[in-house]
Image: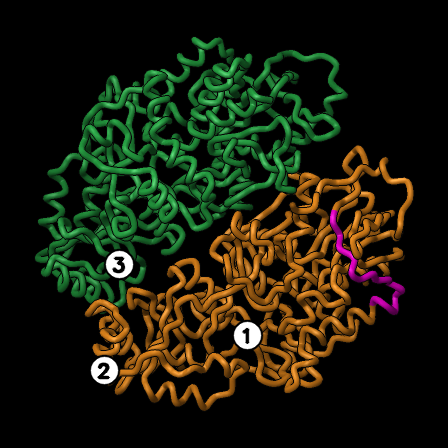
Chain colours: A orange, B green
Amino acid sequence: MPESRRPVAFADIDTWDLEADVVIAGHGIAGVSAAIEAARAGAEVLILDRAGGWGGAAALSGGWIYLGGGTPLQRALGFEDSAENMETFMTAALGPGVDGGKIHAYAHGSLEHYDWLTGCGVVFKEEFWGEPGWEVPHDEGLGYSGGENASPFREIATPAPRGHIPQMTDKRTGVRGAGYMLMKPLVETAETLGVRAEYDTRAQRLVTAADGTVEGLVARRFGTDVRVRARRGVVLATGSFAYNAEMIEAYAPRLIGRPAAAIEEHDGAGILMAQAAGAALAHMDATEVAFFGDPQMMARGILVNGRGQRFIAEDTYGGRIGQAVLIQQDNAAYLVMDMDAHEEALGTETSTPYFRQPPTWAAETVAELESDMGLPAGTLTATVDAYNRHAADGADPVLHKKAQWLRPLSGPVAAWDMRGFTAGFTLGGLRTDVDSRVLHVDGAPIPGLFAAGRCTSGVCAGGYASGTSLGDGSFFGRRAGVSAASG
Amino acid sequence: MPESRRPVAFADIDTWDLEADVVIAGHGIAGVSAAIEAARAGAEVLILDRAGGWGGAAALSGGWIYLGGGTPLQRALGFEDSAENMETFMTAALGPGVDGGKIHAYAHGSLEHYDWLTGCGVVFKEEFWGEPGWEVPHDEGLGYSGGENASPFREIATPAPRGHIPQMTDKRTGVRGAGYMLMKPLVETAETLGVRAEYDTRAQRLVTAADGTVEGLVARRFGTDVRVRARRGVVLATGSFAYNAEMIEAYAPRLIGRPAAAIEEHDGAGILMAQAAGAALAHMDATEVAFFGDPQMMARGILVNGRGQRFIAEDTYGGRIGQAVLIQQDNAAYLVMDMDAHEEALGTETSTPYFRQPPTWAAETVAELESDMGLPAGTLTATVDAYNRHAADGADPVLHKKAQWLRPLSGPVAAWDMRGFTAGFTLGGLRTDVDSRVLHVDGAPIPGLFAAGRCTSGVCAGGYASGTSLGDGSFFGRRAGVSAASG
């Protein structure tokens, strides 16, 4: 029997176990960002986390944070960008159904947000990584992370890399990854500001007054209820619902059995306790989708679906490939390369060497390969014929892969079976306004309740770019802190 | 400013304007079915509808109702079916993420439900329509409505037609369509049982006791609040949210600007007022998608996407084609036929003659057509080559269209531009159990609150078959009535 999420009546609570002006559930990227801003606004701040320490999914992540509009790092590395250009890309890439107000605020606030992060001690190394990859192979500070320089987006907005990666202290051991190096200075900033934290403390239910105002929450610590008074506001920053099996089945069933880049603490608790107070939701089906392919290989090959047809520019962001495979191609994909391209790919640097497995099939001709793969005669061969015909002219009129990756397949060929090579986390959640106030289904904010991060629907309504989760978690986390502190 | 959906406190209401044991919001298929069963269980029943009379979207619909498992009509027309076979098909076709309990109950209760409908006076004419079509051209009583006899489902379950169509009295005038002929005997049955109805009365907010039990609702009639006491239970049967622009943008953005087969009264009100009481949701992104193509033409041609690739068996249910086009093919599709096939199609009967428009392009060869359509060289030609090669052998190993429709394209060819030819309605909504009790986000039923029809998530989690809306609306509407009457 699941624990109740129903609000507890304020009038029924006589004594409080903990008190603060602003109480934050979740000590990941959104929570710590809210804490810093609330403390700077003069509020006494308490963060609760159900885990034994701070970090959330953020500290374990790749650390990419989506920033642009001409950040000092972008400019130092020779890239032009503007808030308008960033807004155009995000609107095109993160929909359909984006929250235009949030994207506008995010793009136009990005320079200030960069300064805020570096002001808190986050360091971005002045080096650019321009090769295809899920992450940077060393400690480079900037890279493409959303297909900005691939079709169709390079025709819609001026390409600019916006994936900002905090510098790692020891990439080889993996102990101090970029996500940790993003979180650590923020947590230290919060501590310096007097923010308190309580761990092993799991927020369970909101406490609401008769008029619906949120006055605190009830948490659970080692089997005991902990009543926590929030004099000014509660901020929910509890993460996604990737590990709530029932919610996944009800809202995002394509992810059943394939959660990734989330932590088991992501059980949807924050969403549920706000829903029980009448909160509205948005885009509950949206998911980030990782794809277990090496970008250096994919860009040099062709990806085909279960009918042997190409379906996406192979040089785009891997997360877009993942979404296309899972949602549009029934989770079926094959990578096809000739031996020269394969050899060239193997000679490149990559952050995902474990995706460089031996091929599933190898053959002397495409027709043999097609037959070995069990594809109907004339399908893969037709795809390769059309690809080769145009690649010889340095063109890809079908999917507009960049000319640098185009070369006709020739000689012996190989294919990789990548069916089911997807996993991901959820992007939908509570509906919030641009000031991170949780909206009631009526449309008005629920007094005293704020939220940010993956328990909310943020800048991603459907599409995704790496760095937008840490990006909107921190950006709108800050706004949650400001709003909560002003009570 | 939208009207509030927050529950009104039971304690704050001194006098009631209307009273009944069971109060039903919405006089469409779900509402009238609930009313009949509640009245038969001995309850005093009152139905409210915001329109000026009964009918809802059901009375204006094509009237298909999804029934099977070996109904008397199926058997009389020579079709074998079983509850297990029906359950297998529905599980495969209506997901991913189907509510297995609901589908099991629906399939295994279908024979009894058929008897219930005919017992109420619904008439199904003993005649089968076997040609491709959105509706039957005359007053036939049975037809395929979900791709049961097309790939991939014909390989998963034994094909059986389950679209049952109430007999029309005057098809030519259209005044007495099948939807009307389904609703009319049900409304008359309800009236005979003493069910009362109030029109121009728009349910706005639930009335809840301090413990969360639903005790009634507040409606709006000509600008005045009407307080309605429900002694045993409230049934929400208010229809979809296809016409709530804000909800469409937040949950099902691909349908922005393209609602269809719904009525403007479908504003999501029932969903919102239950959400405000803590109700859980499911599959809010799921949508039925109609496609403005003539099935007689599509089965005889090939459908290609924006890259000139085939993507679906052209002889399947048009609603599956619509979903594939909108969700998987970026809303782009072209129909390609040779002149012989076109001429043959024009000689067939259809219920959608208005979809038989002249072609957008016509050419002497496929290569010319490809060029005229602006498709990259070697794309459509490769598709037609592969299709022709296998069609000559009576096979379609790529998409498994049935042999009867396979013939190589030859001679002059034509193409129809069908980009954006989609529209639909929403399938997501309140989460209910198999007894039509509305579930709180906690997982437990909300006492006194029941729901059915398109304001709930029913048997369709993702896929769709014609007849499942009137089907689960009536089937689970009945259960809502039984549950509400038992208080």
Query: Which label is found at residue A365?
Result: 2
Q: Amino acid at mark 1?
A: Tyr
In the image, which is nearer the foreground, mark 3 or mark 1? Answer: 3
Residue holding disc 3: B310
Name which residue lies at 35% across and 51% down: B324
Q: Is residue A199 magenta?
A: yes
Q: Chain of mark 3?
A: B
Observer-nearest of B40 and A265: B40
Q: Amino acid at mark 2?
A: Thr
Query: Which label is found at residue A78?
Result: none
Observer-nearest of B474 and A190: B474
Q: Chain of mark 2?
A: A
Whole-percent x and y of residue B256?
47, 44
| Residues shaded magenta | A190-204
**Which structural element holds mark 2?**
loop
Above or below, B170 against A216 in this view is above
Name which residue lies at 48% across and 9% down: B194
Observer-nearest of A156 and B105: B105
Quarter residue A260 falls in: bottom right
Above or below, A348 against B200 in this view is below
Q: Are marks 2 and 3 on the same chain?
A: no
Q: Is residue B380 magenta?
A: no
**Which structural element holds mark 3?**
loop
Disc 2 crowd rating (10 Å Cα; few below 14, some 14-19, many 20+) is: some
Is residue B261 something that shows in the picture? no
Name which residue lies at 41% across and 73% down: A314
Whole-percent x and y of residue A356?
45, 82
Observer-nearest of A163 and A251: A251
Indicate left or right for A268 with A24 as reference.
left
Query: Which label is found at residue A144?
Result: 1
Disc 3 crowd rating (10 Å Cα; few below 14, some 14-19, many 20+) is: many
